[in-house]
Amino acid sequence: MSIRGIFHFIRRKTVAVFTDYPKVFTGLPDNLRASSAELWNVRSLCGMALMLALGVIVDQFSFYVGPIKIGVGSIISAMLGCFYGPVAGGFAAGVGDLVKYLVRPTGAFFFGYTLNAMLGGMFYGLFLYKAKATLPRVVSAKLLINIVVNGLLGTLWYSMLYGEGFNAIFGVRMLANIGKVPVESVVLLIILPAVITVLRRAKVRL
């Protein structure tokens, strides 16, 4: 392929990606209805149960990219949102958080973190349900989750539980969560398409 051909290929792909992005909002009503219907679909319920079981296992693992810690459990939340949408994905992520606490309790139960799990599944579903995991969609989901869920609400819950001053820790925690966005986005852009390809080749319908 010539340089000119490569340039036109990149331009077409870029235009396609950013043309697709407005569908996040225009397709939202239909996606909400379809995601709600997933909760009444036996196949979907079985798939969610399988992912929740997998989530209990992988939640014990994490890895580092330089100084940045990446939790593997968030990938399961992304998969729930991607496959089942904002309603069912958010609900399943919340149930998953409760199951993980029952399997391995760590301190007193606090509903705020269950709410965070539900919001994470919901935000992934808003951007990734019935759509290809493109860079704008993945980065948008991660920004919302890391800023609103982890940075803002996560800091609030931590402050309430451990008596730390919210203003004293908010800035550092927010910067840390924003700093994770590029790495976590790349991880999702690699893993989600790979998982979908494997499931299709195995003829697994979740």
Image (spheres, rainbow, N blue to C red):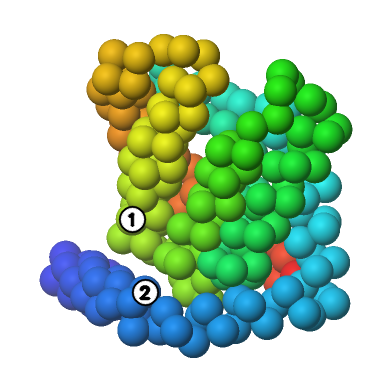
Residue 161: image location, x then y, percent: 54, 20
Q: Name the residue under label 2.
A: 24
Q: Residue at x 40, y 83 (%)?
A: 27
**Residue at position x 75%, y 42% in the image:** 98
Asked if disc 2 and disc 1 are in contact, CB closer than 8 Å, the reply is: yes
Q: What residue type is labelled 2?
A: Val
Residue 62 in the image, given as x and y percentages of width and height = 61, 26
Does 86 sit above or below residue 41?
above
| Kind of element beneath mark 2 | helix
Q: In which quarter of the image is residue 37?
A: bottom right
Instruction: Answer above or below: position of 195 versus 158.
Output: below
Percent position of residue 9, x then y:
25, 73
**For residue 201, what is the image quadrant?**
bottom right
SS at mark 1? helix
Viewer-nearest residue: 106 or 59: 106
Question: Is residue 201 shown to the viewer in this render?
Answer: no
Say whether residue 101 is visible.
yes
Dot 1 alpha-carbon crowd within 10 angstroms: few under 14, some 14 to 19, many 20 or more: some
Q: Is residue 75 above or below residue 89?
A: above
Q: Nearer the viewer, residue 98 or 111?
A: 111
Residue placed under numbered mark 1 in the picture:
140
Determine the residue positioned at 49% across, 29% down.
157
